[in-house]
Amino acid sequence: MKRVYITTAVTCLFMLAVFIWVFRLLNLTGGRESVTVGFIYDNDESTPYTYNFSLAKDAVEKKYGEKARILTCSNVLDDEMEEPLRELAGEGCDIIFFNGYSELVRKLAPEYPDIQFCQTSYMDMSGQAVPENYHTFKGEAYQARYVSGIAAGMKIRQMILDGVITGDQAIVGFVAAYPTSEVISGYTAFLLGVRSVVSQAVMRVSYTETWSSYAQEKNAATQLIRDGCVVISQYTDTIGPAIACEEAEEEWPVYFVGFNQSMSEVAPGASLVTGRICWEPYVLSAVEAVMLNKSIESRVAGRIHGTDVSAGFERDWVEMLDLNEQVAAVGTKEAMDQAIEKFKRGNGDFVFKGNYVGVDPDDPSDRYDLREGYKENENSSYPLFHYILSDVITVTEGGSRP
């Protein structure tokens, strides 16, 4: 019997020694007890885009608690990025996240080789030389835009069947910031989602030439409504377009499709559905990588393009919010779910495809035949589709490049 006790004791001591050895090995090779994380926002949390991005900060706080010291700087313009960046670096940040579009981040990163700089992608980084500690990332927004378009298309079809509008009144409006490929890709995917349900639907786009102006965005949406649009969406940063739809006094209701943040509270009668990029998966994985002293791209689950990463529904990098069942057409959720499952099974090749010809607004001689299909985010997290679909998308006067 004593021999059994001795054997058990020796086994327990051996297992304890192995545990201690493994713990020390992990501690030496990767573990750190705490991390300092910086966030620099181009706006503040009162705007949908920044509010949505700040949810990733909340996720870090929830996961790491006291192990993560979090510092933030808000309302930082792109050309004013240097001072807050250096301030956070001086505060001892191990990793800093940016939701702005400043090139200063990439230029200044080499001065701080021990800090990881992670920026929401603002241009095509494929083939470009970037510092080892500079990373870009973005959810594949066109997927959520397309699914949002399906919800809008279902509603428009219902309006046609109910005799509220006729088929030639199937017009959607889009309030856009600038004619960049990111914006064009987004509203094109939205329209193609609509047309997957209502094939005759067309779109009118109004550029505000600013990312964040409540007055300009609301005015642009109001004018689109007056021009006959029955559904409005946006790629700008304020609640202005949603309010315009809620306050519309037209002969038929006008519905709103949001992005980044649900508008069900500010536009309960008009809000139809919202799509958003989920920044949390990347941010949490990047912080984990720093905690383990690992490379960020080795810990992130997504499409890796060097130090640039993207993903869609298959990795929960985009999602749909708050389908308004009181407003949505019957069968909308089922139609959306079918499309989401299709995205999860494949790579979205079916979106930018059909009997369309796209024209580059900067070079009319540059045309793209969508019968061949176009693969968005194939080599970059930044959207690159930049063609205006002939005959189905009209840009209102005043829309020009900044």
Image: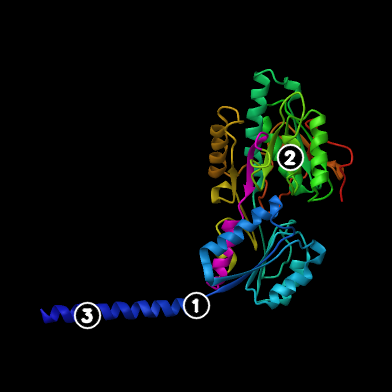
Disc 1, SS? helix
Residue under numbered circle 2 = 243
Q: Over which residues does the magenta segment extend?
A: 268-293
Residue 183 drawn at (x, y percent): 75, 46
Check disc 2 and give the amino acid type.
Ile
Check disc 1 and give the amino acid type.
Thr
Between circles 1 and 3, the one closer to the viewer is 3
Check disc 3 and give the amino acid type.
Ala
* Between discs 3 and 2, the one toward the N terminus: 3
Whether residue 287 appears in magenta in the rendering, the answer is yes
Residue 388 drawn at (x, y percent): 79, 39
Q: CA distance from mark 3 to mark 2?
A: 72 Å
Residue 139 drawn at (x, y percent): 63, 52
Q: Which mark is residue 29?
A: 1
Q: How many marks?
A: 3
Q: CA distance from mark 1 to mark 3?
A: 30 Å
